[in-house]
Amino acid sequence: MRRFAHSLWAKFIAHEYRRNIARALALHHRGEVRGDGLIPISIYTTVEIEWSARDIHPWDRALQGDERNLAFVAQTLSDTDAAISRLFEALPQMDALQLRVVGPHADNIMCGTVYRPAVEEPSTWHSTGMKLKQLGVTFGRL
């Protein structure tokens, strides 16, 4: 029931968003005599965001070398996957998300553009890294 209510609320917010855009394009609200206005053909909203990857969890800080790097990569992939899902859920009017994840030394770790239809499709990948690649995120040496 809660999920249904949230879905209904998201649809309402998206409808209000588009209605506000149509209202802004309705020129007769500016005091013009004509009752017509500009008709939107396409509305597309993109959010651009950049964040810093978290350092590995304190209980993993005793790890050395490759094990520490693997823990950092796994955590960053998991964090990015969760953030993408949550951003699309929190912003129902958003059609695309341009993201960039930087590392502790301001190095680019990941970047890409993720589109809403790709997020709403069920993932066929068991690996978080492959899922992110399927969504349009590139990572590694950028």
Image (cartoon, rainbow, N blue to C red):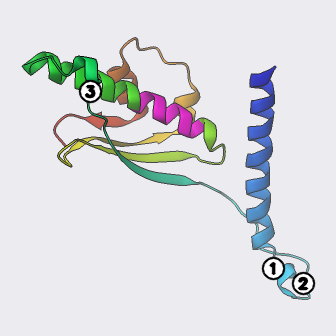
Return the residue at label 2. 34
Name the element at disc 2: loop
The residue positioned farthest toward the top in the image shown: 126
Label 3 crowding class (10 Å Cα cut-off): few <14, some 14-19, many 20+? some
Return the residue at label 3. 56
Q: Mark 2: which amino acid? A: Arg
Question: What is the distance, in whole Å, between disc 2 and disc 1 at their CAs?
Answer: 8 Å
Labels 2 and 1 touching (C-beta < 8 A): yes
Residue 50, position in %: x, y? Answer: 37, 50
Q: Mark 3: which amino acid? A: Ile
Residue 53, position in %: x, y? Answer: 31, 38
Question: What is the distance, in whole Å, between disc 2 and disc 3 at their CAs?
Answer: 61 Å
Q: Main secondary structure of the magenta part?
A: helix
**Magenta region includes residue 45:** no
Residue at position x 56%, y 24% in the image: 121
Return the disc, 2 or 3, that comes first in the chain's sequence. Answer: 2
Q: Mark 1: which amino acid? A: Leu
Residue 62, position in %: x, y? Answer: 15, 18
Q: Quadrant of residue 117?
A: top right
Label 1 crowding class (10 Å Cα cut-off): few <14, some 14-19, many 20+? some
Return the residue at label 1. 27
Return the disc, 2 or 1, that comes first in the chain's sequence. Answer: 1
Q: Which residues are magenta?
A: 80-88
Position of residue 40 in the picture relative to residue 34 (left or right): left
The image shows residue 103, relative to residue 7, as above or below, that is below
